[in-house]
Amino acid sequence: MTKLDLPNYKDQSPEVKARFDDLKQRDVILDVKHLGKIFDSAKGPVTALEDINFQVHRREFVTVIGPSGCGKSTLIRTLAGLESATSGEVLLEGAAVSGPGPDRGMVFQGYTLFPWLTVKKNVMFGLRNQGVSAVEAESEALEWINLVGLEKFAEVYPDQLSGGMKQRVAIARALAAKPRILLMDEPFGALDAQTRSKMQAYLLEIWRHIDITILFITHDLDEAIYLADRILVLDAHPGRVSELIEVPVSRPRAPEQLLRPEFLAARQRLDELIHPPGQGDEEVGKLNMLRFANVGEEVQPQN
Amino acid sequence: MQRCNLTSRIIVFVVLTLSLASPSQAAAETLFVGYSDWPGWVAWEVAVEKDWFAEAGVDVQFEWFDYAASMEAFAAGQLDAVTMTNGDALVTGSTGAQSVMIIIGDYSNGNDMVVAAPGIKSVSELKGKRVGVEIGFVSHLLLLDALESVGLTEADVELVNVPTNEAPQVLASRDVDAIVAWQPNSGQSLSRVPGSTAIYTSGDQPGLIYDVLAVSPRSLYANREEWSKVVDVWYRVVDYILDPATVDDALSIMSARVGLSPEEYAPLLAGTRLLRREEAKGLYQETEGFDSLHGSTSISNDFNLRYEVYRDPQDLEAYIDSSFTLGK
Amino acid sequence: MTSAPWLAPRIALSQQRERVLTLLSFLLPLLIWAAVSYTPFIWHPNMEITEPGSVNYFQEGMQIERETFQEEYNTQLEAGGELPQGFRANPVYLPAPHEVAIAFYTSFTTEPRRRSEQWLHESLWHSIQIIFWGFTLSSILGVPLGILSGTFAAVSRLHEPFIEFFRYLPAPAFGALAVAILGIYDGPKIAIIFIGTFFQQVLVISNTTRKLDIALLEAALTLGANRRQLLFKVVIPGVLPQLYKDQRILLGWAWTYLIVAELIGTSSGITWFITQQARYQNFDNVFAAIMMIGIIGLLSDLLLARLGKRLFPWERSSNKS
C-alpha cells in the first residue's frame, strides 16, 4: 500500500481544537474505571476486557473500533448492564450502574423491534414502562417518529419496513425513553452502503438537535471517523484501550470531508492500529481504500 | 362480562367434578349399578326401558361400561352394584372390594366355547397342542374343565395368553390350534375360521360360570328394602324374556342396547340360560360341584388360589346372600 | 413465459397448483382405497361363498381364504360333488368406500332405538366436550406454567425434570385411579385428556418461550422494563403466535387420547360407538366414525388457523409463504 503524504492526525485546526477544549469542560456523563471482564469457558477463564479506562462528556460522540475479538460488544453490553463487570466500575453521571436501565438507551444491530407492536407502539414502549399516560406517550412518540421521518408509517408493523426504516424506529424508540447516553452496537452493520451513509447523516442530524451523548460501536473505519469526536481504539486478546484518538475533522460533517487530508490522516492511523503491517490484512486495507476513493469524484483510484 | 361468565362456568365445572369425587353416600336414595355387554346383563335393559324400577318404587341408575371398567368402577367405590361372574366377584373382592351376590341371573349355556382349528374334532385331540386363552380368567377355568372331562391336565397342552377379544384373529392366524372365548368372540372365531369346531362349551358344564348381580355390603346393609325391590324387578325381567309372547319385544330392546338387530342377537341370547326365581332357588344349596352357586364359586376360589390370582382364600359365605331369592 | 417447474426447491406454488395438489392429497388415498375395494384382482384374499355346494361347512355369505376355497373346490371336483361358488372379497376389516359412505349417512339419520340412547351427533358432541374441557383445563395450568418455566430458569428446574419423567408414563394407566377419585362419568375421561396433554404442553410451551429472541428482552430491559413488564409486555406477546400454533398441534394430540379416555368409566361418546361396532364386526360403521373424527379434527384446525391470522396481524406477511 502506498503511503500517502498526509498531515499528522494529531494536528488540529484552531476550530477543532476549540471544540475539544469546550468538550473537556463539559460534565462527564460516562466514566469507565478499570473495567475488566473475564468469561468462564470450558477451556478456562478468558479475559475479554482488561483495565478499560475512559470518559465520555456530555453531547460527545464517541465511536469504538477494534479488530474482531477485541471485546467491543462485551464493552457496550457491560455499559448497558446486560453483562456484569468482573472488576472496575461504570459511573453514569457519578452514580455507579449495575443492571440495565432506561438511562442508557441501546440500539442493536438486529433492530430488536417488537414485531407485535406497530411503529408507534414500539416507540411508546419505554415511555409506558416509566408510567407516562397513554395519551402523552402517544403524542411524544409521534414527535419522535416525525423526527426520524416515518410519520406515514406510525401504524405499520415492523416487518413491513426496510432495514434502514427499522433502525430509525429503533433509534426513535431508544431516544423516546430519554436516556442520558445512547449506546449503539454496530447499528448500521446490516445495512447496504447507500442506506448506511444516509443513516449516518440522519444520526448526526438528530444528535446535533438534541441533548444526547452517543457511544457507537462499528467495525467500519470511515464510519468511526465520520461520526465521532473521539475514537476509542481497542486491542484484541485481551481487549484493552489501544488509543483514544481525537478526530481532527471539523463539524458539521459532510460526505466531502471523507477526502480531506485530516480525515485521511486519521484513517491512516486507524489502519495502522487495526491492521498492523505483516498480518496479512494488506488486501483488506487496499480494498477499503479503493472503495472510499471511488466515492470521491475528483480523485482517481490509487493502484 | 364475557370473561367473568367463562371463569364462573369453569369454577362451576371444577366444583362439579370435585363433587363427583366425593363418595356416593348421598346416593342412599339412588342405587348405582354398572352393567356391560353380556346377554344376561343386557337383560336389565328391559327394566330400564320399561321403567319398571319406578313402578316398583326404587330409584336405580344403570350405567353402561366395558366389563373390565365396570369392575374397576365398583372396586373404586363408585358403584353400589355391578354385574359380573361369580369367579370375578372373588377376584374383585380379593383386592378389597368385597361384594354380596344377591341374584344368580344366568349361567352360560354354550356361549363360552373352546373353538378348535379345522382338523381337531374333540378335546382329547388337544393333547400337545397350543391353546390360546386369557390365563387366570373364566375361559381358563372352562379349558381346565374341558381337559379334565377327557382325563387330560393342563400339562398336556401349551397355553398361550390371548385376550378374549382378540381370539378370532389369533385363531385365524393359525398360531394356535384352539382358542377359548365367550360370545360374541367365540361365534366370530367359528365363522372366521371355516372348518373350526366348538369342541367344548359351557353348555357341556352348566354352572361353571354363573353371572350375578353383586352388591357392595355397605349399600346392601343400608338399603336392604330397595335391593329387595330390585330383585323382584329382575325376576319380572326374566319372565318377560322367557315368555314366548313377549320375547320379541325383549329382544328388540336388548339388541338395541348393543347396536345389533334382534335377529343377530337371538343366538347370543340362546347361549345364555336365564333363571326364573324357582330355578334360581335350587342353586342355593350348599353342594359340591357346578350345580350350585356355592359349589361353582368354591371351584373358582380353588382355581384362583392355584393360579395365584390372589393368595388368601375368600370367605365364600360372606359372598352369597340367598335370602332375596329364597323369599322373605 | 414458461411456467415454473412443479418441483422447484423452496419455491411457493401458484394458488391453482396448490389447490390441485390439496385435492390430490385426499384423492390419492381414496383412489388406492377404491382400487383395493373394487378391483377383484387387487388383494381380495378371501372368497365370499354364494353357493356352498357339497362342502359341508360352507355357508352362504361366509368368507373363506382363497386357498382353502380352491382346495375344497378341487376336492369336490375329484369327488364329483356339487361345486361351491363364490366371489373374491376383502376381509370384513376393510369395507369399501361406498359402504362407509352409506354407514356415514345412516349412522347420523338412524333414530335412537332406546329411550336412554343418544343420536350419533349427540355422542359426538359429548366427545367434543370431553376434549374441550380436558384441553382447556390443561391449558389453564399448562400454558402459564410453560411460559414461566421458559422465562425463569428456576421455575423450569423446579418441575421440568419431573415432567420429563412423567410424560413417558402412559396416561391411560391412570384410568382406575381417575375413576376412584373423579367418579364414573366425565371426570376421569377429562382427567385422562388432561394427563395426556398437560405434561407435553408444559414442555412444548416452555421450549417455545425459550426460543423467543433474547435480544427482544434485552431491548426491553434497556427501555426500563421491570420483571413484570418483561413477562407481560414482551415474553407473552412475543411467543403468542407460536404458542397458538403449539396449541393447535397439542389439540390434535388431545384427540388421540379420546379413545382411551372414553373407555374409562361409563361407555360414552364416539368411542362407545366405535368399540361396540367393532365388537360386532360392523367395520363400515367403525370407518365412518373414524372419518368423523378426522373431519372434525381437520375442520377445527382449519378454523383455528383462520382465526390465528386474524389474531396475529403482524404475522401476516410471514404467514404468506
Image (tube, helix red, strand yellow):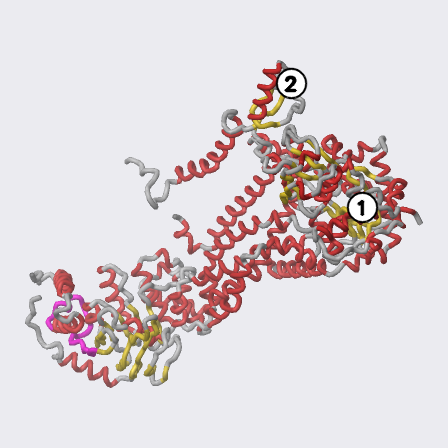
In the image, residue C81 above or below residue A289: above
Viewer-side residue, C127 vs B218: B218
Range of residues picked out in magenta: A242-261
Locate residue B291: give its quadrant.
top right
- State the residue position of label 2: C53
Percent of width and height locating residue A28? 29, 83
Identify the secondary structure beneath mark 1: helix
The amino acid sitting under disc 1 is Ser
- State the residue position of label 1: B296
Asked if the residue at tag 1 contacts the one at tag 2, i.e. Cβ–Cβ closer than 8 Å, the answer is: no
The amino acid sitting under disc 2 is Gly
In the image, residue B215 above or below residue A145: above
Q: CA distance from mark 2 to mark 1?
A: 45 Å
Percent of width and height locating residue A276? 15, 71
Locate residue A292: give its quadrant.
bottom left
Percent of width and height locating residue B21? 71, 59
The residue that appears at 27% across and 68% down in the rendered structure is: A203
Viewer-side residue, B75 vs A150: B75
